[in-house]
Amino acid sequence: MTDLTVWLEATGAVSAAGGLGYAKIRAPRVYWSLVGMPVTWGRFALSYRSTMDVCGLTVQPSGLRAFMTRNVARREVQPVPPKVRRVRGTSTGLRVTLRLPAGLEPADLIASSERLRHAWGVHSVTVTETKPGYVELRMTGYDVLRRVRMPRGAQPRGMVVPVALREDGTAFERDYRAAPMALTLGANQSGKSMYQRNLIKGLAQLPVALVGIDCKRGVEQTAYASRLSALVTSPDDAASLLGVLVAEMEDRFDLLSRHGVSDLWELPESTRPVPVVVLVDEIAELFLISSKKDEERRERIVTALIRLAQMARAVGIHLEICGQRFGSDLGKGATMLRAQLTGRVVHRVNDKQTAEMGLNDLAPDAVPVASLIPMERPGTAVAADSSGGWSKIRTPNTTRDEVVAVCRAFAHLVPDLPVLAPFRPAAPVVPAPVAGPSLVKPRPVTP
Ligand SMILES: Nc1ncnc2c1ncn2[C@@H]1O[C@H](COP(=O)(O)OP(=O)(O)OP(=O)(O)O)[C@@H](O)[C@H]1O
Ligand SMILES: [Mg+2]
């Protein structure tokens, strides 16, 4: 009997250990919640003071405090670390809010984040300033970018689309009102089209007009035709479409001036035109020409793009441009257009110059990070924001069928924009059901 109990206990222990080992690899969220979080929380609570001390993140207490400690409490005066205000567990890690003592700044913690990560045995530690005097340490318990799952609360709303996951476990959102125009760079097969696919999936659910310019004969965007207000697949058509968009921009400016406002969002909802997002899949196709006779077309395209990039924000027309490179080698106007594109996302690149094209103006310290993205992690990128910060992100692996289904489901949101009607793609043909013997008996219409 004792033997049986021992045997059962041993088998139970082995299968529990096996289950946890399996969960660690296959279901890291479950493993983190069951094992990782309690262990890390305990380690953090026990070693906080000593870790901060050895990492140089403590300050000498103020004169009054030192006096009280020495004379009233009769203890030795010790350096003080930042006060822990809140510790919160999430499905991916721990969030700790700290109140900084006088003499420490967020940069001190950022500089030590690698040391803190090793001290507490977590995958990453990111430091974010939440308000003056307070910082949040965002720890992740495992590599959240290995298999991306978006946080549940991240849903498209207003003009904001969650498009990827940040290294710290939060959603990276594309906010069209904060950064009206954006540029996405990356080498072949680095995940640019996947980024745009995720964007289309989110935008499709919002009341906006989507315009596709896909000069690779439409291989990427044709599938989403049911939700697109316009789609062009050749540079000639792109030139006409951009001309129409510039005219639309001018009409919208007339409307703004009639109402005495300077921004589309200040208009009353009943008269506000619908925002338009123009998605360009490969910008080089619009810039490069093979013969002299195409020069005039190129000129028209580049001028229209620059005008839109410079002014169209106020009237709710946004550019979302993808490309493998975007430098002066594309020809006249390229760097001028690039300067107008505020949002920057750089995927894996083959050379440092390409990373510099995207990041040097906004976040120069992110350039080496973009150059080191491994090939076997497509979809990983560095996203810079206009505040000088940057983060490592990865898009979820969304299938084309999934996005096609979303586009179909939200096809009723395609707005009524007569100017774009000539460019409206035919809705994709749904395969007809295979003809079989009819079960309905034909009846003559006339009696
Ligand atoms: N986040 C991701 N997770 C997993 N796989 C991805 C991810 N992003 C992209 N991929 C895969 O990487 C491959 C290349 O992606 P994608 O077509 O988006 O690259 P691209 O940069 O547009 O390439 P190209 O310049 O050739 O158009 C695809 O097979 C895609 O399935
Ligand atoms: Mg592509």
Image (cartoon, rainbow, N blue to C red):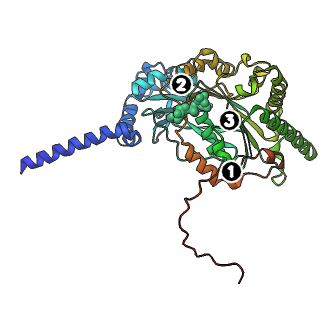
Residue at 23% x, 43% y: name it. Answer: 15
Residue at 65% across, 45% down: 224
Q: Secondary structure at mark 3?
A: loop
Label whose residue precedes the other's in the sequence (2 or 3): 2
Q: Earlier in the sequence, mark 1 or mark 3?
A: 3
Q: CA distance from mark 1 to mark 2?
A: 75 Å
Q: From mark 1 to mark 3, how far is it between C-alphas?
A: 16 Å
Q: Percent position (x, y) of residue 80?
A: 48, 24
Whichever of labels 1 and 2 marks the residue nearer the N terminus, that label is: 2
Quick one: SS at disc 1? loop
> Is 81 in front, or is 288?
288
Q: Residue 363 at what x, y percent from top left?
A: 64, 21
- Of residues 340 and 31, the one drawn nearer to the viewer in this rendering: 340
Q: Nearer the viewer, residue 198 or 268?
A: 198
Label 2 and label 3: CA atoms lie apart by 73 Å
Q: Identify which residue is drawn at 65% across, 53% down.
A: 410
Mark 2 CB in 8 Å range of ligand 1?
Answer: no
26 is higher (above) or lower (below) than 333: below
Residue placed under numbered mark 2 in the picture: 64
* Figure quarter occupied by ligand 2: top right
Which one is in front, 307 or 67?
307
Residue mark closest to the camera, 2 vs 3: 3
> Given this view, does label 1 or label 2 mark the residue nearer the observer?
1
From this view, report whether residue 331 is shown above or below residue 34: above
Q: Position of residue 85 (x, y in %)?
A: 51, 37
Q: Which residue is mark 1?
A: 427
Q: Which residue does the image show at 59% across and 57% down from the upper left?
A: 432
**What residue would you read off at disc 3?**
217
Residue type at mark 1 is Ala
* Quadrant hosting residue 210: top right
| Callout 3 amino acid | Arg
